[in-house]
Image (cartoon, coloured by chain):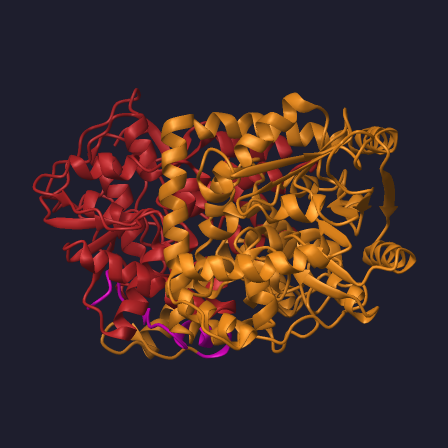
Amino acid sequence: MRPGILVHTMAGAPAGPTPGLALDGGGSDGRAPTTAVGGGVEAGSGGGRHPAPLLDSTAMRVLLMRTCLSDAIAPKVWKATRRALERAGVEVRVPRGQTCCGQPAWNSGHPGQARAVARHTIKVFAGTEEVVVPSGSCSAMVVHSYPDLFRGEPDEADARDLAARTVEFTQFLARHDLDPRAKPCGAVTVHDSCHMLRALGDGTSARAALDRVPGLEVREMANTDQCCGFGGTFALNYPELSARLGDQKAHDAVNSGAPEVVACDLGCLMHIAGRAHRTGTALRARHIAEVLGS
Amino acid sequence: MSSRRRRAPGGVTYDDVTGTLRERTLTALRDPGLAANLRSAGTAWAEQREVMDRDYGFNEMRDRARDIRRANIRALPALLTQLQHRVRENGGTVVRAADAAEACRYIVGLARARGVGMVAKSKSMATEEIKLNDALEDAGLEVVETDLGEWILQLAHEHPTHIIAPAIHLNKEEVAALFRAESNGDVPDDREGLVAHARMRLREKFAQAEMGISGVNLAVAATGTVCIVENEGNIRLVTSQPRIHVAVMGMERVVADWDEAAHILQVLPMAAIGYDAANYVNLISGPRREGEADGPEEFHLVIVDGGRGALRGSEFEEALSCIRCGACLYSCPMWRNVGGQTYGSPYSGPIGAVITPLLEGPSSPGSRDLPFMSSVCGACGDACPVGIPLQDLLVKARARSRSPATTKAGWAFRLWSLLWRRGLTYRLTIVGWRLGLRIRGRGGWVHRLPGPGRAWTSVRDLPSRWPPRR
């Protein structure tokens, strides 16, 4: 391995002795050849379906923000994101020590606590590379709310710098016209998460990425722009109202005729799927990265 | 939902509202008719709004409306002084009221001094805010609401559910039942028949009223003119038929000149009802002058601060741009499911959840929870015709609130912040959490979580494997 070249994993198999349990928190620091660090980078694990492109020094390099929800609920999502990006020819570094963008506290009215966590995130993602996030919500937090959160703070410039470099995963694909060459897939319906659609103003990137998946048909649901009712701590403060909105979303998704709903945000999906499961509604849910990184 | 209007001293919210906001939410969710009525209203509004976007480039119009209103708020003291001078030059009286009590005291005093027995009112959120009807009724005056929706609510002893469409939560069968009870007689079932019935009953009242009280959509500082927009024609009667006309406005409802007024008056009905014009635009510059055939003998303009002045220069200043169109209510998935009455305040929906606690103070039990009943989905900010970033203001209103949702969660977020500002402690919590998921998971799902997670599993399962099993 040459310095500056990241070791890729194509298989994305869970690493470590207890699959799915250990936090795949490590990752390459990108400066030196890496071996497995906390299971984060599986050097030379091989067995990939696609051969790893050998990247040269001109390859696009990005930092991947895993998101806390992916760590806590679905590590497959950030791994699929990395896989999709790498297959599209992007060099991905997963900075070690990353935690959370701070949105839970910010949204709940605790900007001071949010700032302490966000400050850590700013340090972890220092650099010049774009920061790719498989979440419209976390991305909106950094892009849209960090400038607000750090207004008048000594590290305001750093916060603005990170905000300018941060981009949601499908937006990144659209921006650079990248194709992750996903496996064929059947019909899905798309849920526009609120932060993707309104905070980032993007209702097209996810569909553009899905358009490139062979055999995939997007069946649009009614009221696709309506909130699913997740809303972070809102889901805990007003569970019944949150559930009502989740029911409406699941209903619209099922009526689209597609067996599966995909979205750019794991929060929405775990709420929609969790409510659908509780009510006995037959609906599968998958993060868009899992489709594109399949 | 509640019997109407007992006075809460100093508060904007209604004090006859019972239960917590969460409990009221549950009550509303159990009412199947309510959600259906609200949804059809919200859908009809959204369809018309799309027509406006397509035919008029509503989004560009909104940018200009935002700029106008922001400039108005920045120049507010000067505009109000100018307005005051012009209205006086036109022969009207201007009263600046610091709060609801002052405003009510003036209007009640005026009614007493002039020997008024009956007051005809048109729809006004400002009078709803200052609880003027209570004050007038306590003083022994008869008050008749002449807006169809408001009259229906007066008969039903209910509070409005929407800024523009106060009785939109009721369907025509419910309205017919109320009319029958009021008139002790035969009332037709169809829409036209019901409207004709209301018109007949209300006309009788107009002839008797000695004082007409209206709200104000906009006041034009340059000429001292108040603009009141309506579809029914009752405002024209309220402001011209009785001897005395009292107009009540929040202090922020002023624009500089007619160029600005023309634009806002165009944007208002587009945003509010999705039509390019309202049926009537009333422009009133003082009382009847010599040689004029009609109009009131006296015109009084009551300008209420009520906590608004303190918002200038604060992070909530943009909320003062509001032109009370109600678009954010229609767009809001919360409002569409629980309706305005659940909020317990004249101002419901996203704008109500922002401004009610601002006007009442962060500790007010009636309003401190309001900013939390939102998923912060941002549909409101998109719908707003003057570009108020309502979703951002909701988040800021949460930080300012002394609601248990802020104070009780405070310790949890302090702990969270300590653990998640370092990679190592973050990893420990995640490993612990995932271990917990494994232990509690059954067939890929967790059905019951302890502690704060209980609220999650009270209505939904949590996937312990991903992608979730069906």
Q: Colour of chain A?
A: red
Between residue B363 and residue A4, name the one nearer to us: B363
Task: Work out whether A208 lies above or below A135.
Answer: above
Residue located at (27% from left, 54% from top): A76
Query: Count the marks: how many?
Result: 0
Between residue B414 and residue B139, name the one nearer to us: B139
Residue located at (18% from left, 53% from top): A256
**Residue B107: x and y, percent?**
84, 55
Q: Quadrant of residue B162?
A: bottom right
Q: Is residue B462 magenta?
A: yes
Task: Work out whether B9 lies above or below A226.
Answer: below
Whether residue B121 can be seen here: yes
**Residue A285: x and y, percent?**
24, 58
Residue located at (42% from left, 76% from top): B30
Magenta segment boundaries in residue numbering: B450-470
Report the quarter where the N terminus of chain A lies: top left
Between residue B157 and residue B111, name the one nearer to us: B111
Between residue A47 and residue A269, name the one nearer to us: A269
Whether residue B418 can be seen here: no
Q: Residue furthest right?
A: B113
**Residue B279: x and y, percent?**
51, 39
Residue A209 located left or right of residue B131:
left
Residue A251 located left or right of residue B334:
left
The chain drawn in orange is B
Q: Is residue A272 magenta?
A: no
**Residue A44: x and y, percent?**
20, 43
